[in-house]
Image: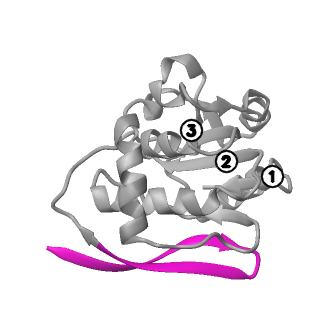
Amino acid sequence: MRYFYNIFIVLSLGSAFCLQGQFSLHQNHLATPCSLHYLNYKSDQLYPITSPEKQAKIVVIPHSKHEDAQCLMAATYKSLQKQSFDTVILVCQAGSDLFHGGALPYAIHGISSFKNVLIKLDALEKISKHRLFHYYQPPFYGNLGIQLQCAFLSLLKEVSVIPLIVGQLSNDDACEIAETLADCCGPETLII
């Protein structure tokens, strides 16, 4: 079965880039470092896109175990390679863990997804002082979003990453978290 999506990938000030893609949902492959080059090659064929003219500030990247979705991720990251980022705020959704607020990792070396990315520890410390953020490790183990995003982030130029996983939130809490994250943004920060 095939599904058709209009996916907005790169949002930058005053512009949005949209890809139309066909996603085959019968494939079930998880990206590994050795397969990233293959996904990069295949993404050129499936999603030929150009780099945005303006500096991207927010990128919405769907993640999935399906190969076509991973090719879309590869195309998105490739389109960002010529841009200059010093920090990426990586916001992923919680899996089966039920908690309120945002989870921050406290044992960075215990999470294999982080082995090839530089974690911005001072920003984690700053964010942890907010009432909605807590050091809570379990959501980071086996989180598909963290695994895939970090694999692709490791291919970008050296950037510091602020990883967090968001659990259940009210609308007011979501706005408060957005304001807190905005305080961590500089001119070369990308939010994923």
Q: Is residue 151 left or right of residue 88?
A: left
Residues 52 and 16: in front is 52
The percent position of residue 71, horizontal first and vertical second, equals: 38, 59
Q: Which mark is residue 185?
A: 1
Vertical side of 119 occupied by 73: above or below: below
Q: CA distance from mark 3 to mark 1?
A: 20 Å
Q: Residue at x 59, y 41 (%)?
A: 164
Q: Quadrant of residue 172?
A: bottom right
The residue mark sitting in front, 3 or 1, is 3
Which quarter of the image is occupied by the C terminus?
Answer: bottom right
Q: Is residue 121 left or right of residue 68?
A: right
Q: Given the image, on which type of amino acid does mark 1 rest? A: Cys
Q: Which mark is residue 154?
A: 3
The percent position of residue 84, horizontal first and vertical second, equals: 77, 54
Which circle's residue, 3 or 2, is located before the other in the chain? Answer: 2
Which quarter of the image is occupied by the N terminus?
Answer: bottom left
Vertical side of 177 occupied by 1: above or below: below
**Crowd rating for badge 2 (residues with CA inside 10 Å; few <14, some 14–19, many 20+):** many
Residue at the spot of label 2? 89
